[in-house]
Amino acid sequence: DECATHSARCIDAIRGDIGFHGLLMTDDLGMGALTGDFRARAEASFRAGCDVGLHCSGDMGEMAAVMTGTPRLTGAPLSRARAAEHARNAPAPCDLDELTRRHAYLIGDSPDV
């Protein structure tokens, strides 16, 4: 009966059945599937278990309403946000031997990559 963004049952399935333990963001709170004012949409999303809300229209009145319905980021949601930020900034793993071979090829010291 509810959109997944507002459904604790769906969020529980994502966290439990699927086993996703990362940062969980809502769909756009302006999507047509949601009802109520923007504060209510935000509150329902966090009550269901989302960590952060997404609002895309850029309408200042809507953004202010979303803000009033958004709790302070603390506890497990804050830990997940920090982990997501760390993962985003972590260097990608690389194969040093492969990079050395490619470098040699690019500078003409080797006929193959």
Image (cartoon, helix red, strand yellow):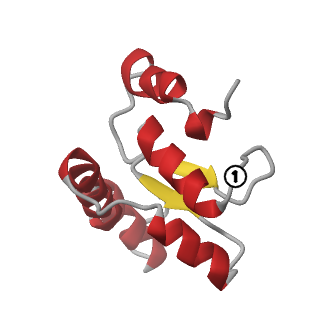
Q: Which residue is mark 1?
A: 36
- Closest to the observer: 18 or 99? 18
Residue type at tag 1: Gly
Q: Residue at point 46% right, 36% down? A: 48
- Indicate left or right for 5 with 50 as reference: right
Provide residue 99's location: percent of width, then percent of height: 34, 63
Q: Residue furthest right?
A: 32
54 and 69: which is toward the camera: 69
Relative side of 62 to 14, left or right: right
Residue sitting nearer the eye, 104 or 1: 1
For the point 72% across and 46% down, the residue is: 34
Above-or-below relation of 17 to 2: above
Decide if residue 50 is on the left or right side of residue 91. right
Q: How many labels, in total?
A: 1
The quadrant of the rendering that contains the N terminus is: top right
Q: Is residue 94 visible?
A: no
Dot 1: within a 10 Å radius of its alpha carbon, few (fewer than 14), some, or many (20 or more) residues? few
Q: Is residue 89 visible?
A: yes
Please, is residue 63 above or below residue 78 in the view? below
Q: Residue at x 61, y 33 (%)?
A: 4
Tell me which residue sits at (39%, 31%) in the image. Answer: 20
| Disc 1 secondary structure class | loop
Q: Residue 49: which quarter of the image?
A: top left
- The image shows residue 94 at horizontal and vertical percentages of 30, 56
